[in-house]
């Protein structure tokens, strides 16, 4: 199953939020397994429980960066910098980090 099909299965068919969907898909791409608590912690990370705050794609992406770079042995300063750069690039590409602005309806 390719990533596009996996996203459709998780998000559309199984109603898994954006944050968990991106965590699961990036985990598959980078061969990272999560413990149950990690995925459970992301249940409310879809714009802060639907409040339409920070986008779940950003939240899940930031969680992944922390996990991935920690496994690479990077220090916290490096991980924070990578997260900053990700957020900056996401904002430049999509215009916002906020679900409210990214999905106005």
Image (cartoon, rainbow, N blue to C red):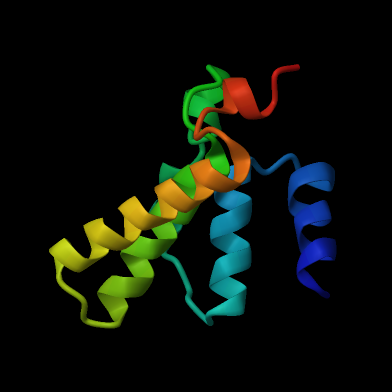
Q: Nearer the viewer, residue 62 or 45?
A: 62
| Residue 48 seen | yes
| Residue 50 in the image, given as x and y percentages of width and height | 57, 21
Q: Where is residue 21 shown, x and y percent of the image? A: 63, 53
Q: Is residue 87 left or right of residue 14?
A: left
Residue at image location 53% in from the left, 17% down from the top: 51
Residue projecting furthest to the front? 92
Q: Is residue 3 left or right of residue 51?
A: right
As rendered, which of 11 and 58 lies closer to the eye?
58
Q: How many marks?
A: 0
User: Which residue: 53% across, 80% down?
Assistant: 30
Q: Quadrant of the N terminus?
A: bottom right
Is 85 on the left or on the right of 74, as rendered?
right
Q: Is residue 73 above or below residue 105?
A: below
Q: Picture coordinates of residue 104 (x, y %)?
A: 70, 18
Which quadrant holds residue 103?
top right
Quadrant occupied by the C terminus: top right
Residue 39 in view: no
Q: Give the residue drawn at x 45%, y 44%.
A: 59
Residue name at image x 54 percent, y 35 percent: 55
């Amino acid at each position: 199953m390719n990533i596009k099909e996996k996203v459709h299965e998780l998000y559309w068919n199984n109603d898994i939020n954006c944050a968990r969907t991106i965590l699961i898909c990036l985990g598959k791409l980078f061969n990272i397994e999560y413990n149950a608590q990690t995925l459970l912690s992301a249940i409310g990370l879809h714009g802060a429980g639907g409040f339409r705050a920070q986008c779940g794609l950003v939240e899940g992406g930031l969680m992944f960066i922390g996990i991935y770079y920690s496994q690479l042995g990077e220090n916290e300063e490096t991980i924070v910098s990578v997260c900053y750069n990700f957020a900056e690039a996401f904002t430049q590409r999509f215009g916002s980090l906020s679900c409210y602005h990214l999905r106005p309806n």
